[in-house]
Image (cartoon, rainbow, N blue to C red):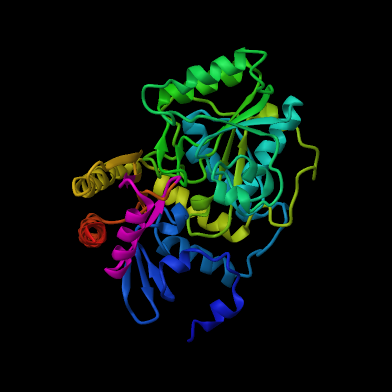
Amino acid sequence: MTRDIYTRRESEARSYCRSFPTSFAKAQGSILTDAQGNEYLDFLAGCSSLNYGHNDPDMKAALIEHISNDGVTHGLDMHTEQKEAFLTAFEDIILKPRNMDHKVMMVGPTGTNAVEAAMKLARKVTGRHNIVAFTNGFHGMTMGALAATGNNGKRDGGAMPLQGVTHLPYDGAMGGEIDTLAQIEWMLDNPSSGLDAPAAFLVEPVQGEGGLNAASAEWLKGIAALAKKHGALLILDDIQAGLGRTGTFFSFEEMGIEPDMVPLAKSLSGMGLPFAALLVKPEHDIWKPAEHNGTFRGNTHAFVTARVALEKFWKEGAFQESLKDKARAIEIGLTSIADMVDGAFLKGRGLMRGVDVGSGELAGAICAEAFKRGLIIETSGAHDEVVKVLAPLTTTEEQFAKGFEILRDATRAALNHHNAIAAE
């Protein structure tokens, strides 16, 4: 197969394929295999869309059985056995044990659809227009979610004014000495600050694309208190940080916070199938029928695999307990990388970690060298300065050891090249 078809026909918007220039043929667990038979350890996992790895055998078997039995492929938002089974499992395994009474709103197939629905509903509930979002935040690429996204490169693609959102500093955004929560409180309390009364605060507990900035429990509880004080809703975007990525199903569940809405997507299907939903406190579920709709509200195939994922990984506590050891392995591995680079430091939380190496040029070079050696890993951050680990949560201890060995070799090679250029 020639790759000319991509340059000839596919849009210039394509991106990941530029970092990983090969054609992948199959995948299993934490391994991707290209058309030439070369194997790559996957430390990207579909940007956390494959938290349970590629082609989990139990999810695959359930999906094949569903398709083979002529199960419903597309059902709009009609009742199906598969949706009922998913909702029942989600209620019993996730919501009830966490004392959450949220409704589950089926939205379009991606995370940005869940964010759009949350912003729209917050405005409908409160009668206000302004959404407070945060520096370095990323919430999606459709126009409403894009307005809440901080990255200029993404925002410029909108090609028109992005309105209805005020961006305030995230926890630690201005250095550890500056209390951004106090700044935000001052602006909200000051009737001459120019900050319109917010309909909602939209915040990622851990900023994925923004550079793995992790908000403290104290800061998030402070934001929750400010939202309540000022009559705004709290939307915790758990699209990338949720579903086990930080070590618990929700990234906020051990913080004593009760969000009004929680956008979910990415690994919600368990198998990489498009599936997004919005959790909504019942008192805010004031939609009229079809007031917010869409052709692909829910994915019946995803209901099948999502149910299996919940029952297999979250019904008992063993899987969550295993994540503690894997989080430690990632921290140890990344510390070994940070020790190689002057001024480097770790960022993130749980299994959503990375190392800030100080420049996007160096981070990109490290990831490129890693790919040459059989490891798929990407960057994040305002300047792409963070080498970011998003390995499947099912990655084995041996695979982590191999991955970090590759990453150390890649870092060494990138540093040698970087230092050679600097010496010229």
Classify residue 22 as left or right of residue 156: left
Q: Position of residue 143 (x, y in %)?
A: 68, 47
Classify residue 102 as left or right of residue 75: left
Question: Closer to the camera, 414 or 375?
Answer: 414
Q: Position of residue 229 (x, y in %)?
A: 60, 15
Q: Residue at x 45, y 54 (%)?
A: 47
Q: Residue at x 36, y 25 (%)?
A: 176
**Residue 355, above or below 133:** below
Instruction: State yes or no: residue 261 in magenta.
Output: no
- Residue extending furthest toward the bottom: 1
Instruction: Give the total number of marks visible in the rendering.
Output: 0
Instruction: State yes or no: residue 371 in magenta.
Output: yes
In which quadrant of the rendered image does the C terminus lie? Answer: bottom left
- Tell me if I can see residue 49 in this picture: yes
Q: Position of residue 409 (x, y in %)?
A: 20, 61
Question: Closer to the camera, 17 or 98?
Answer: 17
Q: Which residues are magenta?
A: 354-382
Q: Position of residue 34 (x, y in %)?
A: 38, 76
Q: Where on the picture, by quarter, is residue 345? A: top left
Q: Residue at x 52, y 23 (%)?
A: 223
